[in-house]
Amino acid sequence: MSVNSSHSARVVSIASGTLASRVTGLLRVLVLAWVLGFTPLADSYNLANTVPNMLFDLVLGGVVGATFIPVFVERLTLDGERRAWRSISSVVSGAIVVLVVASIVSWFAAPLIIDAFTSLNHAHSAATLDTLDHQRAVATELLRWFVPQVFFYGLIGVATALLNVRHRFGTAAWVPVINNFVCIAVLIWFHLVDPSPTVASVQGTRDLLYLGLGTSLGVGLQFLALVPSLLRSDLWRLTLRFDPRDPAVKAVTRLGSWTLLVVLANQASLYVVLAFAFGVGGSGPVSAYTYGWSFMMMPYAVVVVSVLGALTPQLASLATLDDLEGFAERLRFGLRQSLVIIIPCTLVLVILAQPLVAILLHHLNATRRLSAGVVLAILAAGLPGFTIFQLAIRGLQAMQRASTVFALYVLQNALTVALCVLLGRHSLAGLTASVSLAYAGGAVAALWALHQRHVTLISGLWSVHVRRSLVASGLATIAMAVAYAGPSSNQGLGLVTRFAVALTVGIVVYALAVVLWSRRVARANRNGARF
């Protein structure tokens, strides 16, 4: 089997699981919007549920993704199985200790964390001040029950890295389905016991406790579902031991120090975005941003994360062998694979964001402009830049260029914060645009950084496959816009029909454009072969 076909098989394996995970994740978002709506309680829940992910990234998540796989692959390549697994055991043992300490500290610091996120919301009346106090109290209580997620997300990250080193990718992509179904069940139960909850009515109740613990239970079960695959992956050499002088621990510490600075920059930027969103006020701005981001990440997670998951061990091996030509070819291949699908997805989301959000989150009602739809359209416009930036960063991480990665993230996050201050202080649309523009700027800088290290991706950006997708997507976008603009129904079945027709027209035009382009290229190749 060729390298490309082997890679493609792995991508399909990851993508199938990721698609199932994202579809059930989308269902989870729909149920959440149905149960909590765009309300102060929804903002409290979404804010509290975002913090564990931020804390995990801060204490370990970024380090796992950026350093564990390259370091593990390097040790296995240079030291052999026996010595390598002693080193890997030291790294894993240290990670578990860090997770335990971080979880305990986070539980006690929960009130301070929530106060920091809500500090930009200044109530102007007694009623809004009372609601804000309830929001903070509920978010703090939920965060304390969400804190176990930090520990379990850490175990999931470590387990996924170990499985990827053994070239096992499918299981880790599928197990989030369990988490999503558990969370959906908990949310439905919560709706049945309290059909009309408010921050005041649920504060301090047993129902809120069960909502928090039930959400965290899903993450715990997600990790347990990985255990059988770990046991089947010849990981029996893994033991609990810690040697700070071990070369793998030193490598992770060296690279991880830079990565920790990267994560600090990322979390500072995310804090600014969420704090400004909370400060905008109105009907659930934090929830609107959260839901819009979730929808935007759907194509990225299914396509790009799958490509990167299969590509990272290959990149790490090529970087260890100092094969820059092969490294660049692999990275360009992954970039082409990603952009060919991301480009049409981007344009579909830009054109149809409002009806999509109305159908899924607003009870088939698009009679007014929806905040989540605005967020989704603007974030989708920045999706190609986001994709290029992440692929370039993964390449630099595989090369163990930690200081360069840090500099790029500082640039991207500094742009985000500066643009948020200029554009997003009182506008959710301006806030969202700040994020998209910053990733576009970061993508340009990341491509230049790779070029400076003799890894050029420009040919991947402008390959025949990408040009074909871009042209076909442009034609499909025009057709979709015209088809959607024709009817005038903004509610119920009429809205669904209007959306479905526009989407179908876009897909048909895209497919026809690709077929015609391919035939023209084939004809040109035949004519060239005759001479």
Image: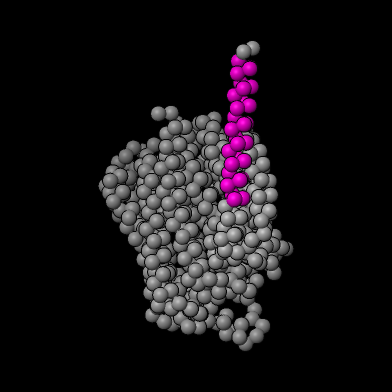
Locate residue 464, reporting x and y percent. Answer: 62, 32
Prevailing secondary structure of the magenta residues: helix
Where 454 sits versus 485, above or below?
above
Residue ID at (58%, 74%): 118
Q: Is residue 317 left or right of residue 129?
A: left
Instruction: Answer yes or no: is residue 434 visible.
Output: no
Residue 446, located in which quarter of the rendered image?
A: top right
Pick the residue in front: 84 or 183: 183
Where 476 sits versus 410, above or below?
above
Locate residue 157, reporting x and y percent. Answer: 41, 54
Q: Residue furthest top?
A: 531
Q: Is residue 140 left or right of residue 181?
A: right
Locate residue 39, reporting x and y percent. Answer: 55, 74
Colouring style: one colour
Residue stretch rendered in magenta on the structure: 501-529
Which corner quadrant holds the C terminus?
top right
Residue ID at (44%, 36%): 7
Which corner quadrant holds the N terminus?
top left
Locate residue 211, reporting x and y percent. Answer: 41, 72
Residue 164, located in which quarter of the rendered image?
A: top left
Where 336 sits versus 232, above or below?
above
